[in-house]
Image (tube, helix red, strand yellow):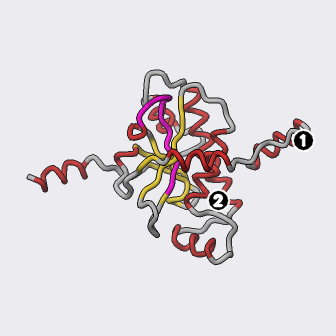
Amino acid sequence: MLAAISSVAQARKKEPEFATSANDPVLRAKIIALAPSIDPEDARRVAEIAYTTGRDLKKEWRVVWPPGLHNFLVNTGQRKGGLCFQFAERLLWRLSGQNWNTVEFHWAESFERTASEHNVIVVTAKGQDFYQGIILDNWRYGGRLVWGYVLQDPFYQWHENKSQFARELSKRPQPNPSATPATSATASAVE
C-alpha cells in the first residue's frame, strides 16, 4: 500500500518547463491561474522579468553548462557570479524594484545547508500559500528560465525561508538619488 501511495505522489511530479520567451503565453497563463485576483499585466511582467534576468545574467557571468562546472568556475575565482543563490538574489532584486498589485514573491530553498542546496524565487497571488506557487529558476539550465509548481518539482523539495527573503531584499542596491533620470533608467536596466 505504501508503494502505491508513493507512486501516485511521484506521478504528480513534473519536470519544470522551459520558458519560451519573455512573453511566454503558457507561463503567463499559469501565473494568472494561481488565483482569480491576479492581474494579467502583473503575470506578463513577472514572466518578462524572470526570463530576461536569466538571459542577462548568463551573458554577464559567462555561464557555462552544466551548473556544477559553472559553480566550480565561480568557486575558484574564474567567474564573478552564477551560483544558484546569486541568480535568485538578482531576480528578487529586479522583481522587488517594481510595484505589484496582485502577486508576491518568496525565497525558496531545497537541501538547505548541504552541498546540494538550491535557491529559487516563487511567485504566488498576494496572500496565497507558498506551496501553491510557481518556482522561477534561472540557474538549473545555465540562465534559461524554467518554471513549475512548487510541489511538482521531481528534483527538489522546496521550503520557504522568510528570513533569507528579508536578508536578500536588504542587500538590494538602491537607486542613486543624485543620478539623472537617464542614468537611473540605465542603471535599472543593468541591475
Residue at the far top: name it. Answer: 37
Q: What residue is drawn where x is 84% and y is 43%?
A: 176
Q: Residue at x 47, y 32 (%)?
A: 29
State the residue at coordinates (80%, 46%): 187
Q: Main secondary structure of the magenta part?
A: strand
Residue annotated with mark 1? 179
Nearer-the-camera pick, 135 or 163: 163
Residue 37: give its label.
none
Whether residue 19 can be seen here: no
Disc 1 marks a residue whose amino acid type is: Ala
Question: In terms of depth relative to the viewer, which is nearer, 59 or 182?
Answer: 182
Task: Look at the numbered disc 1 and give the secondary structure of its residue.
Answer: loop
Task: Judge whether residue 41 can be spotted in this image.
Answer: yes
Direction from residue 79 to residue 37 in the image, left or right: left
Q: Position of residue 110 (x, y in %)?
A: 42, 56
Q: Residues within 10 Å of mark 2 (few under 14, many from 20)?
A: many
> Residue 87: x, y in percent?
60, 55
